[in-house]
Amino acid sequence: MKMLNILCEGQTEELFVKKVLRDYLWAKGAMVKTRLLLTSKKRGVRGGIVSYQQVRRDLRLWYNENAGKKNEEHFYTTMIDFYALPTDFPGYAEAMNVMDIYLRVEKLEKALQEDVNILGFIPYIQLHEYEALVFCGLEFLRERHEGVEKAVRILQKALVDFGGNSEYVDGGWDTAPSRRIVNELARVSCRYNKPEDGAYVASRVGLKDLRERCRHFDSWMQQLDLVVK
């Protein structure tokens, strides 16, 4: 049995895997398991990246837990955001000198793969964060919330300003995809629920369109397709 273990940065990514990705991969013959990053072992808190070492630790611990299990072939991947990525990630300084964002994130993923150094590991860092996928289906926010038409139009205009490529929507403190969505909905007295709204919109868009519109996301999916086929 092929087992795909996905280490998620937070609840938003985990819910996306459970509601959108899991059935797709199961249909291809792979069982999917998720785990949230351990933020504080002492307090039992999971979700969010404090430092690179917690990512490395969690991946290697998970790998060691599964070592030697018979009749199971394990693969590992991550779903973490490039936005606010800790600066102690391997290759971070060198990657920041690369102008092209796709080459930049690919350089980070390669350095991550080399440093974690476990079999069957497919690193994935989302450009710029999970809400790039939500920007592919902003219109579906109107199915979740009333009175958000103006906010949706403003967000759609922002996407046009980035050439329609949601992975280009930048990672500034006030201009990251999630910040844009949270701020615009707040202006019309609406609260954006990152896990629930994020998973709903992505499911309404569908994997096919997400892959067509998000080049780096599709590159990850192609790698997953190869290991689970």
Image (cartoon, helix red, strand yellow):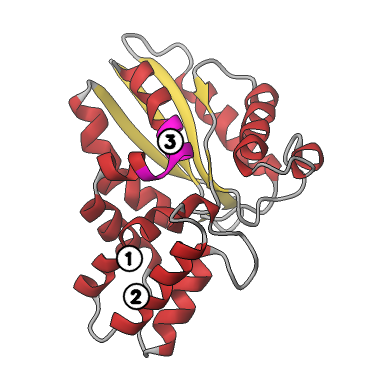
Foreground residue among 209 and 110: 209
Give neighbour class at mark 3: few <14, some 14-19, many 20+ (Cα, 10 Å): many
Q: Secondary structure at mark 2?
A: helix
Q: Secondary structure at mark 3?
A: strand
Read off the magenta span. Answer: 213-220
Residue 216 lies within the magenta run: yes
Please say if 219 is above or below 174. above
- Estimate the x, y position of residue 89 in percent, counting from the top left: 72, 41
Asked if the residues shown at circle 2 and circle 1 are in contact, with their CB atoms under 8 angstroms apart, the answer is: yes
Q: Amino acid at mark 1?
A: Leu
| Spatial separation of the CA atoms under disc 1 and disc 3 | 26 Å
Q: Of label 1 and label 3, which has the lower sequence position?
A: 3
Give neighbour class at mark 1: few <14, some 14-19, many 20+ (Cα, 10 Å): many
From the image, state whether disc 3 or disc 2 is nearer to you. Answer: 2
Kindly identify which residue carries mark 3: 6
Give neighbour class at mark 2: few <14, some 14-19, many 20+ (Cα, 10 Å): many
Residue in the picture at 48% in, 16% down: 67
Please say if 116 is above or below 163. above
